[in-house]
Image (cartoon, rainbow, N blue to C red):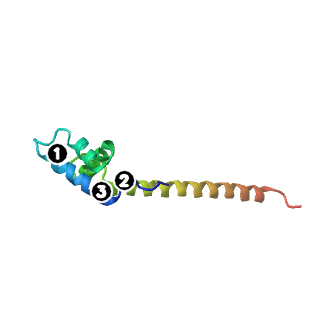
Amino acid sequence: MAGPKKYSDELRERATRMAIEARSDPATRTGALRRIAEQLGVHPEALRTWVKRSETDQGLREGSTSTDAARIAELERENKELRRANAILKSASAFFAAELDRPAH
């Protein structure tokens, strides 16, 4: 399970919006992420990750969107649980099949 978030959602959205706007202007593009991260007290790598995720979600960058990634994770969890249940059922059926093959006393 994930721990508590270090940065609030509002700060993430604000920082991401500021970085995308700064990067769109050629005059402020250079060093925009580092500068904005310092201004807001955010780690520059965290801001870079947020910007990358936002651009992917908006279709500006290749990759799976946040909703797609969440859906994939959900399906993988479901698949894991179904495999586990299937293994239990196979074990149970093998056990009961062995019981039927034993001679009655």
Is tag 1's residue or tag 2's residue first in the polypeptide sequence? 1
Looking at the rendered structure, the kind of residue marked 3 is Leu
* Res 50 label: none
Q: Residue 11 carries which label?
A: 3
Q: Which amino acid does label 1 sit on?
A: Arg
Tell me the element at label 2.
Answer: helix
Image quadrant assignment for residue 12: bottom left
In this rendering, is residue 62 above or below 12?
A: above
Q: For the C terminus, which image quadrant?
A: bottom right
Residue pointed to by mark 1: 23
Q: Disc 1 to disc 3, how far (Cα)?
A: 18 Å
Query: Label 1 crowding class (10 Å Cα cut-off): few <14, some 14-19, many 20+?
Result: some
Is tag 2's residue or tag 3's residue first in the polypeptide sequence?
Answer: 3
Q: Which amino acid does label 2 sit on?
A: Ala
Along the line of sight, the residue nearer the viewer: 81 or 54: 54
On the picture, is 8 further left or further right than 31? right
Residue topped by disc 2: 69
Residue 98: x and y, percent?
75, 55
Q: Residue at x 15, y 41 (%)?
A: 29
Q: Give the Cα separation between the discs numbered 2 and 3.
A: 22 Å
